[in-house]
Image: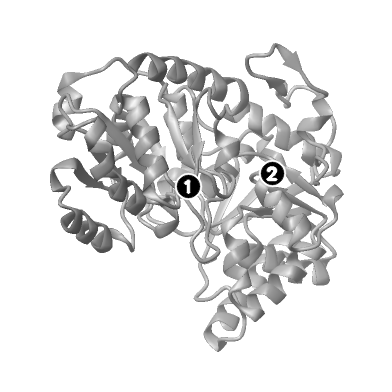
Amino acid sequence: MNEILVLASVFPPQIGGSGRWLYELYRRLPPSAVRIVAGCCSGCEEFDERQPMHIERQPLHLPSWGLMHPQAAWHFYQAYRRLSKIIAQNTVSCIHAGKPLPEGLLAWFLRKKTKTGYLVYVHGEELNIARSSRELAFWTQRVLTGAGAIIANSGNTRALLVHDWHLQPGRVYVVHPGVDTDYFRPAPPSRHVRHKLGWNDRPTVLTVGRLQKRKGQDMLIRALPMARQAVPDILYAIVGDGPERQQLHSLVDALHVQEHVRFHGDLTDRDLLECYQQCDLFALPNREVAGDFEGFGMVLLEAQACGKPVIAGRSGGTGEALWDGVTGLHIPCDRPEPLAHAIGQLLQDPDRRRTMGTAARTWVVERFRWPIVAGQAQEIFQSLGHLPFHGGNGLPLDCGVPGTGRTDDMASCTRPPTVP
């Protein structure tokens, strides 16, 4: 049987939404149809032994995405040689690249040598990173133009590809990331867990994500002096670490809101789940900063799967991860006033939060469960000829509009929509 060769520099057990997305899509295909070449990370050997699909670890974390630096070019060439050998020794029919750079660039060169076609995943953020360098923009354009198909993580990312990178709309498909709704699920309030987290009975707003400017933790901290006028004992719990940690601590001190902010750092999976389940409100106050934006926001799905209303910034693709006004609020987060107003409104209205949380759980179960998302991806692969059409492996798609009882044309899940 012919194989899909998947190239993924980020792949479980390494933490990362892009790697989890690929893992959940490809582990649901027949094991004989997939060969994964993934980046090395701690704990990968034990993880790989438990997987039915073939996983081979290669050093795909290159010193640079470009080829101008001699060391980067050498590492790239070594990876190219190893992958050429894998293709020669196996029945690889196509390559699926986890990102345009470096995986897509490897696929672009491999196509020239082996005539093996490829598709590439695009997450959004990397497009603006590529724009920051003439070399990266050059290679990214070559990769995108040479791909047989592109899978974007959101309609927003797809629009960027069509309008800014001049790709033909018919070559760009949208497959949203998903969520494990069996793991991320609601739980009753627990005084014991909230005490362990240091939250106690305080109304708690949670943000989960890397500490970077585009995530907007700083803007929510700036909103606290206004928000505490409506909710005096408000607590802002921040999970994650990153380059903005010191700046955020300094901002907390400057605004004298030390009693209203708790930095949790990186947490274990179990502790993170408890944070989702016990918070009162989840916020991802993202905004665009110097061209950097949030491509989708998987944390919004995880929070909603736990029955929590969410707030997201009106930037990037986060609007596609919630149902505005029903499961949460989609608001501008480039200044603190709208954020403080929205937080105050929801924290003072437990009935509305409860209604939104119930709708949020239904929203993600109906649209974003991994089996549904994987079924959409599988139909795309079949339409491209990367998988044979046969029964038994596919999963039914759910293109209904939650709350309406309406089922749209099922082909709309896989066919690229019209871009205005």
Which numbered circle lies on residue 219? none
The answer to whether any part of residue 339 appears in the image is yes
Q: Position of residue 238 (x, y in %)?
A: 28, 44
Q: Residue furthest top?
A: 405
Q: Please, what is the three-letter code of the amino acid marked with disc 1?
A: Pro
Q: Position of residue 27 (x, y in %)?
A: 60, 37
- Looking at the figure, which quarter contains the N terminus? top right
144 versus 414 height, above or below: below
Neighbourhood count class around disc 1 (C-alpha, 10 Å): few under 14, some 14–19, many 20 upward: many
Q: State the residue position of label 2.
A: 155
- Does the residue at mark 1 contact the one at mark 2 (Cβ under 8 Å)? no
Q: Position of residue 165 (x, y in %)?
A: 75, 63
Neighbourhood count class around disc 2 (C-alpha, 10 Å): few under 14, some 14–19, many 20 upward: many
Q: Position of residue 33 (x, y in %)?
A: 72, 41
The answer to whether any part of residue 91 appears in the image is no
Q: Please, what is the three-letter code of the amino acid marked with disc 2?
A: Gly
Which numbered circle lies on residue 12? 1
Q: Where, by quadrant of the figure, is residue 100 drawn?
A: bottom right
Camera-near label (1 vs 2) is: 2
Which one is earlier in the sequence, the residue at label 1 or at label 2? 1
